[in-house]
Amino acid sequence: MHTKTTSQTNLEIGSKLGAIIQDTSSRTELIENPSQVLAEIGVTGDVTLLADTADMVHLVVPADVDVNRAAAGDEAYFEELGRAALGTCFYDDLPE
């Protein structure tokens, strides 16, 4: 039950965060006051907010890596790690 509740809570927070990021003024508020905005949607604890720009993309290093799958050369796992690290970073037109 705890896992299901935690997953539901994470989905709700993710949904709220997604809405904030898609709205220009809300996104600006998040970047300028991350602790306040995150607290309002239920995110507490030690969180660092890094906002990508056209000139800067942040790579997130996952907290846990399955060393056995990595050592085995598991391509599906590497793709999974790549998606986790890059999140939704995608630019059609890269800066020069």
Image (tube, rainbow, N blue to C red):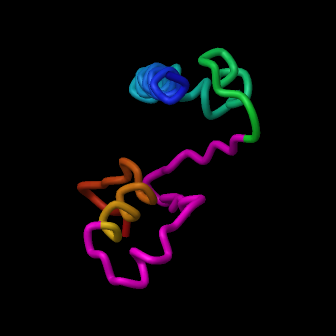
Place residue 84 in its image quadrant. bottom left
Q: Is residue 24 visible?
A: no
Could you say where residue 49 lies in the image, as x and y percent from the top left?
A: 64, 42
> Measured from the top left, where is residue 53 in percent x and y?
48, 50
Residue 54 lies in magenta, yes or no?
yes
Q: Which residue is drawn at 40% across and 50% down?
A: 87
Left or right? Give the position of 23 relative to 6.
Answer: left
Is 92 part of what is drawn in magenta?
A: no
State the residue lying farthest toward the top.
40
Q: Can residue 71 be seen in this view?
A: yes
Spot occupied by residue 3 in the image (x, y as percentages of width and height): 50, 30
Q: Quadrant of residue 2?
A: top right
**Of residues 50 and 75, the one drawn nearer to the viewer in this rendering:** 75
Horizontal arrangement in the rendering, residue 56 relative to residue 88 (left or right): right
In the rendered image, the vertical position of residue 74 relative to residue 7, given as above or below: below
Rendered residue at 52%/67% (across/down): 65
Q: Which residue lies furthest to the front in this view?
A: 1
Label the magenta part by its dominant secondary structure: loop
Left or right: residue 26 versus residue 92 is right
Quadrant (top left, top right, bottom left, bottom right) of the C terminus? bottom left
Q: Which residue is drawn at 63% across and 19% down?
A: 42
Q: Give the range drawn in magenta.
A: 47-76
From what the image shows, is residue 52 above or below residue 16?
below
Residue at image x 65%, y 15%?
40
Number of labelled discs? 0
